Amino acid sequence: MAGDGQDGTQAADAMRAAGERMRSAGTAMADQGSQLGLHLLSQAEANTQEAFRAMRAAAQANDVNEVMRIQSDYLREQGARSMSQAREIGEMIAQFGRSALGQMRGQ
């Protein structure tokens, strides 16, 4: 059983390497979570700015038809913006997942 010591050392080394990969993946996930949070804040800020822009335009409108057009334009643009933002967030989350799996596998 001379090989048992070497097998034990290899197993311990493999466990240390796996632990290090998990620690590295955890750090990367925390960083990516911060990036995601900042991106969400940027999106919320852009949405708020667009809402105030539309409210200002509606407040300066000359008649009800113009107010209705401004509201309609805002809702259409906000719907497109929301879809785009959801796609961006989904892509970020998918990329973070791929990255974390790669780190866990040592790639």
Image (tube, rainbow, N blue to C red):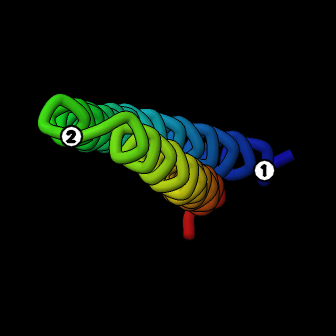
- Residue 33 location, x and y as percent? 39, 34
Crowd band around label 2 with a 10 angstrom C-alpha radius: few (<14), some (14–19), many (20+): some
Task: State the residue position of label 1.
Answer: 2
Q: Is residue 29 visible?
A: yes
User: Tag count in the figure?
Assistant: 2
Tell me the residue that label 2 is attached to: 61
Element under disc 1: loop
Relative vertical location of residue 60 with respect to residue 72 in this rendering, above or below: above
Q: Is residue 95 above or below residue 64?
A: below
Q: Quadrant of residue 11?
A: top right
Amino acid under disc 2: Ala
Q: Which mark is residue 58?
A: none
- What amino acid type is highlighted by mark number 1? Ala
The residue located at (25%, 35%) in the rendering is 58
Where residue 92 sits in the image (x, y, percent)? Answer: 50, 55
- 17 lies left or right of 59: right
Can you say which quadrant of the picture contains the C terminus? bottom right
> Which residue is at 44% across, 53% downward?
73
